[in-house]
Image (tube, grey):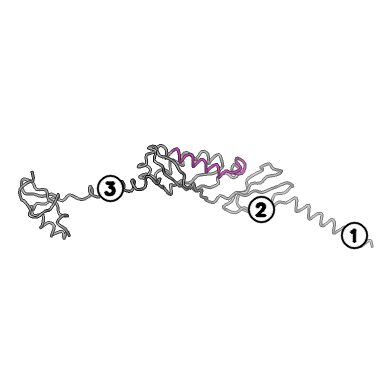
Amino acid sequence: MAEITSIILFLIIAISACLIWANLRTTCTVWSFQEGLAFRYGKFVKALPPGRHTLWGLGYEIRMTDKQLRQLTVQSQEMTTADKAPIKISVVASYRIDDGLKYLSVAQMPEQILYSAVQIALREVIGSESIDAVLEGKSGYGSQLKLLVVDTADTLGMKVESIDVRDVILGGDLKKPTLECCWRKKKHWQGLKKPVVRLRSANACEWRASLRVKSSAHAVALFTASGECAAVGCQHPHARAPHG
């Protein structure tokens, strides 16, 4: 009977020792893309670098923050430009957690605050530009937007890597006129970029044949007093006298 009592007592002591051992020791593994934060009774103690860690004592809690790159998409923001043109713009912000303690302690929903900061910055930048400037230079607004939100992100423990304008959608009343305007500008610049070739021969047809131009309208001739031509129009028959 005494032996059975001793065995039971030994088991109770052993189980109690195991429970105390388990409660006195807190272990965790921090991966290379993470930052571990050790808290004891709700108070921050220290940051844990990548690796395996063992903390001795009661009341420890380990919180992990992921430092991998993340994306925040601000979808189809309706706004007006400086010349009162209605447009919709979508932007994508790339960011990562830079300070885990700030990220966990400063705000309850840090991504939502960053979203609002990007939204406000977008309205500030686009609202000061004309519709033509927005359409022609949308790739250059990322650096301006980043400068406007970098302080807010730093306060939240985040680092903004880049902000890019993804889509620019015109309002319904502007789509057709703007497309027509862009088409006219394109045709205009194509006309300006045509090379001017000066010829010593007054016969534009010979020049057209030598270049294998399909139509005589493609050959141009500007006649001078000396009989030279320099690309303005080819019509049959060719006059060798100067225009005017």
Front-lying residue, 163 or 97: 163
Q: Label 1 vs label 3: CA separation?
A: 100 Å
In this view, the residue in front, 130 or 108, is 130
Residue 96 — which label?
none
Q: Is residue 47 magenta?
A: no
* Depth order, front residue of 160/166: 166
* Mark 3 residue type: Arg
Badge 1: how crowded within 10 Å, few (<14), some, or many (20+)?
few
Pointer 1 or 3: first along the chain: 1
Q: Earlier in the sequence, mark 1 or mark 2?
A: 1
Residue 163, above or below 206: above
Q: Residue furthest right?
A: 1
SS category of the residue bearing label 1: helix
Residue under the point 51% across and 50% down: 71
Which segment did they paint magenta?
Answer: 103-124
Q: Residues within 10 Å of mark 3 (few under 14, many from 20)?
A: few
Identify the disc placed on residue 6: 1
Is 84 rendered above or below residue 70? Answer: above
In this picture, residue 228 sits left or right of residue 29: left
Left or right, 18 with respect to 55, comes to right
Kind of residue at badge 1: Ser
Q: Residue 184 got which mark? A: 3
Based on the picture, tell me whether residue 114 belongs to the magenta stretch. Answer: yes
Quarter occupied by the C terminus: top left
Residue at image position (39%, 44%) is 140
